[in-house]
Amino acid sequence: MLGEKYLPPRVGLICRALSKEMAALVRSRQKMANEKGDRGTILDLALQDKEYGSQATLNELVDQMKTFLFAGHGTTASVNSWAYYYLSYHPDCHTKIKAEHDEVFGPDTDLATVGQKMNSTPSILGKLEYTLAVPKETQRLRPIGDGARYAPPGYIIRSATGAGFDSTGTILNVQHEALQTREEIWGPTAAEFDPERFNSICIHAFRNASPRIALVGIWHTLR
Ligand code: HEM
């Protein structure tokens, strides 16, 4: 693994054990590739891909699976934790979620029954408009992190006064939390938790902001 020599020995051990476990999993799914049955995991999809599935090396597949494992866990854990935090302060939102679930899934709250409905008709999830707005609003206020990108050569950043800064050769950090709580984009309630705002997509971005700011707002709304 790239950079493993810089890790503390115990972490290195855990990483090697994980790689071994993942390699065994990849091999077993490769063997099963032509068998019938449930083949819907992300690993199966990669293996089924005509080009990638036959060309990717074991090490590459293991690395890809590790990326998905880590990228998927911390992010969803963070969003869920913050969502529960906000819902605990906004019992009205919690009540709306429950009402929407009753409406979409019916009164039977048995997990197996609800799971069966989701599996047989996945499009049913699209009806959970309010429920889906809650993680969006949570991520608006508590985004996972920033986005760092190398500036393209000659890229000039302008301040509000028009002063220019040539950012060639620097890494730019897009501060999501600052963008996603700006009143020009989100209106006077920008700092408040209000999932309803996602029902009227980014009205403030269209009305008040410059096209560039509006685009940022719309992008974050959709994302
Ligand atoms: C609510 C959950 C999630 C959030 C908030 C989230 C957030 C992000 C963000 C902000 C990036 C871009 C980072 C950057 O380039 O600056 C990213 C990239 C990525 N995410 Fe997620 N993510 C989530 C769930 C997942 C899940 C479940 C998976 C995998 C199963 C995943 C896999 C990835 C991968 C592979 C990339 C890198 C894409 C690339 O640049 O090629 N993410 N994620």
Image (cartoon, grey):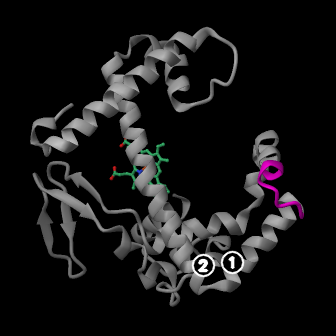
The residue wearing badge 2 is 87
- Residue 83 in the image, given as x and y percentages of width and height: 55, 71
Q: Which mark is residue 94?
A: 1
- Residue 199 in the image, given as x and y percentages of width and height: 68, 72
Dot 1 or dot 2, earlier in sequence = 2
Q: Amino acid at mark 2?
A: Leu
Look at 25% across and 80% down and name the residue there.
160
Quadrant in which the N terminus appears: top left
> What stretch of residues is rendered in magenta?
107-114
Instruction: Between residue 218 and residue 7, name the one nearer to us.
Output: 7
Residue 196 lies left or right of residue 21; in this view the side is right
Instruction: Between residue 58 and residue 121, name the one nearer to us.
Output: 58
Separation (CA) of disc 1 from disc 2: 6 Å
**Magenta-span inclusion, residue 41:** no
Q: Secondary structure at mark 2?
A: helix
Q: Amino acid at mark 1?
A: His
Report which quarter residue 89 is drawn in. bottom right
Instruction: Between residue 88 and residue 46, name the one nearer to us.
Output: 88
